[in-house]
Amino acid sequence: MDWIENNAWMLWLVLALVLGGIEMVSLSFVFLMLSGGALAAFVTALLHGPAWLQGLVFALVSVGMIVFVRPLAIRRMRRGIEDVRTNVDRLVGSRATVMEPVDSAKGLIKIGGDVWTARAERGEFLPGDVVQVVAIDGATAVVAPGDETSPYRS
């Protein structure tokens, strides 16, 4: 029993690492918070705190992190996922160059390095005009006059 009291820091460190490893598989943020509690208990053991204090620190820090830190981390992670535009969604707002005349029925534009069929939301555009993609309708880009102040660039 004397050995455990003298080397409790090792047990807390191993527990923190094991819980961290479980978190890498589960991705639930619960085991990460428990790992944080184990690290706090590890520090308490290094400072020669009694076993009851180490356990109390582990419990309080773990519960505190689950209640206060975990919701913030989950909210931040979900917000980041929703903000990412992929596939054709990322093209909306981009500037494009007219390759062939574009009217309300047909035309061709170049977005970045790709050539797309296009139709004008309003008006007509001639080759060389800069337009802005306002929507994607199937495989056709719907374009409007280019806005030079747009934050989106192709």
Image: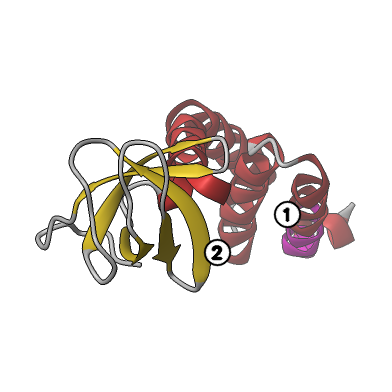
Q: Is residue 87 visible to us here?
A: yes
CB atoms at circles 1 and 2 under 8 Å apart? Answer: no
Q: Main secondary structure of the magenta part?
A: helix
- Based on the displayed image, in which of its 4 quarters is residue 95 positioned? bottom left
Q: Is residue 68 left or right of residue 95?
A: right
Q: CA distance from mark 1 to mark 2?
A: 17 Å
Circle nearer the viewer, 1 or 2: 1
What is the x, y in percent for residue 29? 63, 39
Name the quarter where the C terminus is drawn. bottom left
Is residue 77 inside the magenta stretch? no
- Based on the displayed image, in which of its 4 quarters is residue 31 positioned? top right
Q: Nearer the viewer, residue 5 or 16?
A: 16
What number is the disc on residue 2? none
Magenta segment, which residues?
A: 6-15
What number is the disc on residue 16? 1
Which amino acid lies under the numbered mark 1 shown in the image of this protein? Ala
Circle 1: is it few (<14), some (14-19), or many (20+) Cα within 10 Å? many
Residue with the mark numbered 2: 47
> What residue is at 43 percent from the left and 31 percent from the top?
68
Which amino acid lies under the numbered mark 2 shown in the image of this protein? Leu
> What residue is at 22 percent from the left and 65 percent from the top?
129
Secondary structure found at label 2: loop
Q: Nearer the viewer, residue 23 or 149?
A: 149
